[in-house]
Image: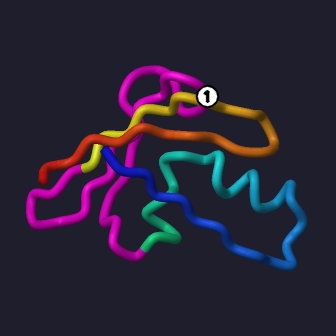
Amino acid sequence: MFTISKSVCTDAPASRVWKMLSELESIHLWVESIKRSYCVGESTRGIDTVRICELGDDVTIKETIVAWVEGESFTSSAKAPP
């Protein structure tokens, strides 16, 4: 198992950044390598939400949100082909 962590500094207000990041289905709009993204089931935010990210060439990543601090952060666990 491995961990990926990413930090970015921005001049945008935290509320604006959180609004963008917490709209889980829209990640394909700002991560160029993701061609399509959507949530499975009824939930689109919060713990246990499942997000699918399609990268093309039949590569799909399935993420499950395992921690959620509203307005602040979330943590996901991802499964992808090797």
Looking at the picture, does residue 15 appear above or below residue 77?
A: below
Picture coordinates of residue 14, whole percent (x, y): 86, 59
Picture coordinates of residue 13, whole percent (x, y): 90, 66
Q: Dividing the picture into quarters, in which one does residue 5 lie?
A: bottom right
Instruction: Name the residue rendered at 81%, 42% in the picture.
Output: 71
Question: As drawn, is 61 to the left or to the right of 31?
Answer: left
Q: Dividing the picture into quarters, in which one does residue 59 lie?
A: bottom left
Picture coordinates of residue 44, whole percent (x, y): 53, 32
Looking at the picture, does residue 9 appear above or below residue 55?
A: below
Q: Is the image coloured rainbow, by chain, by secondary structure, or in one colour?
A: rainbow
Q: Name the residue under label 1.
A: 46
Looking at the picture, does residue 30 appear above or below residue 47?
A: below
Instruction: Name the residue rendered at 64%, 54% in the picture.
Output: 21
* Quarter of the figure that contains the N terminus: top left
Instruction: Name the residue rendered at 76%, 61% in the picture.
Output: 17
Near mark 1 (Cα within 10 A), the count class, few <14, some 14-19 or many ≥20, is some
Which range is magenta?
32-60
Please state the total of marks drawn on the protein image.
Answer: 1
Residue lying furthest front? 1
> Which amino acid does the dot numbered 1 rest on?
Gly
Near-viewer residue (12 or 75): 75
Instruction: Name the residue rendered at 63%, 41% in the picture.
Output: 74
Magenta segment: does it hold 51? Answer: yes
Element at badge 1? Answer: loop
